[in-house]
Image (spheres, rainbow, N blue to C red):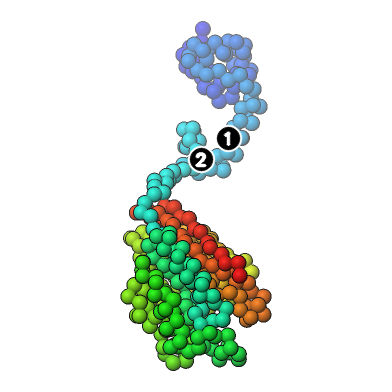
Amino acid sequence: MLGRDRVREIRESVDDKGVDWTAKKYGLKRETVRRYCREGGGVTKESSNDDVVTTNATLAAIAECYSEKELKLLASGGLPMEYKHTPVHNFHGDVVRIGYLSDTHIGSVYTDYDYIDAAHDEFYEAGVDMVVIAGDITEGVSNRAGHVYECTEYGYDAQKEKAVELFADFDFCPLYMIDGNHDRWYIKNSGAKIVKDICDELPYAEFLGHDEGDIVLSDSVRIKLWHGEDGSSYAHSYRLQKLIESLQGGEKPSVLFAGHVHKYGHFFERNIHCISAGSIQKQSKWMRGKRLPAHTGFGVVEMEINDDGVGRFSNTFFPFYA
């Protein structure tokens, strides 16, 4: 009968080297070694010494791949990395409807004023809470040869008066505008701010700024109107993607309505709903010469806003097949 110290020594040897190695070292039968382990409450390892060496090498290789924190998580049955669950709490909130159009180019032979009337009727029928226009309200007057022959109303006074006439029936909701490069021809030529002057004639209209402007709906939702003086991109989304990339920290809106290139598209980039608003003006000869199509139409956005921002967003575009 072996003493307690020797039994403890055998159990530790089994735990470390396995049954076969221990039996050979102490000159005992395998069954005797297993019995000592059972009597002492130890765990009998049936694997050979080779198996133990391989197992130890494998565990060492695994240990090299993880940090101490990750090894503890593995040992406890957890994941080798922490997982943060972020639930979406609410898609619902206050419903806001926005009618949008851009590049009306009032005073151009390529603008059909019936299109503005059609947009008015749809906005009224939809019960929009506001209408936004993303620049180039008027055709302006340039120094381009032959431009005078492409105008139905020529000059500041004529184009301003026509714009006031066309938007006179938009009094059922606020009307927000920015100017575009065509409107700013008057600023460059004579300092006249034609879009601001149009809004001053309409008590429900507000001029938001030159080339861009913002509307605050709540602490969590802000709308930006933007025009720009750049050109079209082959992929319609690329232009707005680069614009969104250029916005600095704290400047991102929730919704962006963009004009200038006469293209329609709805894109979601960096958590911003981006609408390229199309145009009311049809394709001009200048655009045809540059092989640039015009997406003629307008749209209505319906969204639900809450404390987290825009919960849901839907957009309907109304194209004119001119």
- Residue 59 disc label: 1
290 sits to left or right of 114: right
Q: Residue furthest top?
A: 1
**Mark 1 and mark 2: span between their CA atoms?**
15 Å
CB contact under 8 Å: marks 1 and 2: no
Q: Is residue 52 above or below residue 175?
A: above
Q: Residue at x 47, y 70 (%)?
A: 117
Q: Residue at x 50, y 38 (%)?
A: 79
The residue under label 2 is 80
Percent x, y of residue 202: 35, 77
Q: Is residue 160 above or below residue 212?
A: below
Percent x, y of residue 231: 58, 76
Q: Which quadrant of the structure image shows residue 262?
A: bottom right
Percent x, y of residue 156: 45, 88
Q: Is residue 217 above or below residue 165?
A: above
Q: Residues within 10 Å of mark 1 (few under 14, many from 20)?
A: few
Q: Is residue 179 above or below residue 316?
A: below
Depth check: 248 or 302 in front?
302
Q: Residue at x 39, y 46 (%)?
A: 89
Q: Which quadrant of the structure image shows residue 17?
A: top right
Q: Amino acid at mark 1?
A: Leu
Q: Can residue 259 be seen at all in this image of the molecule?
A: no
Q: Of helix, strand and loop, which one carries label 1?
A: helix
Q: Amino acid at mark 2?
A: Pro
Q: Of helix, strand and loop, which one carries label 2?
A: loop
